[in-house]
Amino acid sequence: MCQICSIWDLEAQKYDVNMVSDLELLQIANCPIITELPKLKNIKELYILDCPNLKDISQLENIISLKIFYCPLLTNIPYISNLKHLDMISCANIITIPNNITELIVNNCENLKLTNIKNLNILEISNCNNLYDIYNFDFIKYLKLSNCLELISIHNIKNLQNMYIKDCSSLRNIVNVFGLQSLIIDNCDNLELKTKINTKT
């Protein structure tokens, strides 16, 4: 598989989309000149790192795996029909993400809303202090939460197999979580396990 680390350097004013037209994996890093991405039809895996002025990725197509780190001006991830894996770090203004993804990893994305994402199998969230509850997921197999200081409740999650919770100091209850095979809780001092957690026997 072809790969490129950066298609724009720090001073570039123009780029040639044809240069990356046949790539399947593309990495874009440290490019403050970029404000939007062009249409990239063949890219399957896209990694965007430290593009502080990037605002628009609405033309993306056919992406399966998308990683976006340190892009503070992005406000949403568009619906991409093939997208399965989404990984975000320090994208503080992203509010909405597609509802068709199956794996979501989030670190320090304060404004993200987890609504209508029904097909998730893997969910990892850390350092998101505007997150108050996790609920109503039918297909999550793996849930990891760390340092989500305002998280209060986890409830109504079916088919969950593995759950790891660390440093969620406001977490008070876990209700109606079904199917657990592994449960690890670390430094969640206000949690009371008095409600229904069903494990597989």
Image (cartoon, rainbow, N blue to C red):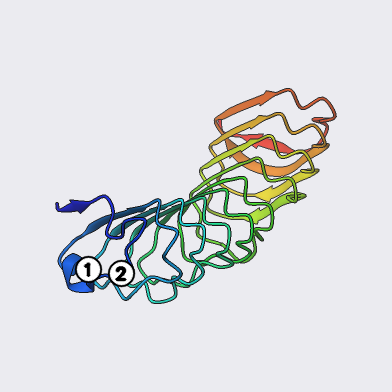
**Residue at 46% in and 69% down:** 35
- State the residue in front, 42 or 54: 54
Residue 84 image-quadrant placement: bottom left
Please give the label number shown on residue 160.
none
Q: Position of residue 184 (x, y in %)?
A: 62, 25
In the rendered view, would you say 38 is above or below 115?
below
Dot 1, crowdedness within 10 Å: few (<14), some or many (≥20)? some
Query: Which residue position holds label 1?
Result: 42
Give the mark toward the camera: 2 or 1.
1
Q: Position of residue 30 (x, y in %)?
A: 40, 51
- Provide the secondary structure element on which disc 1 rests: loop
How many marks overall? 2
Query: Which residue position holds label 2?
Result: 62
Dot 2, crowdedness within 10 Å: few (<14), some or many (≥20)? some
Dots 2, 1 in contact, CB < 8 A: yes
**Residue at 81% in and 43% down:** 152
Looking at numbered disc 2 in the image, what kind of residue is underneath it?
Asn
Relative placement, left or right, of 167 versus 102 is right
Relative placement, left or right, of 188 versus 177 is right
Relative placement, left or right, of 78 versus 46 is right
Q: Position of residue 65 (x, y in %)?
A: 36, 56
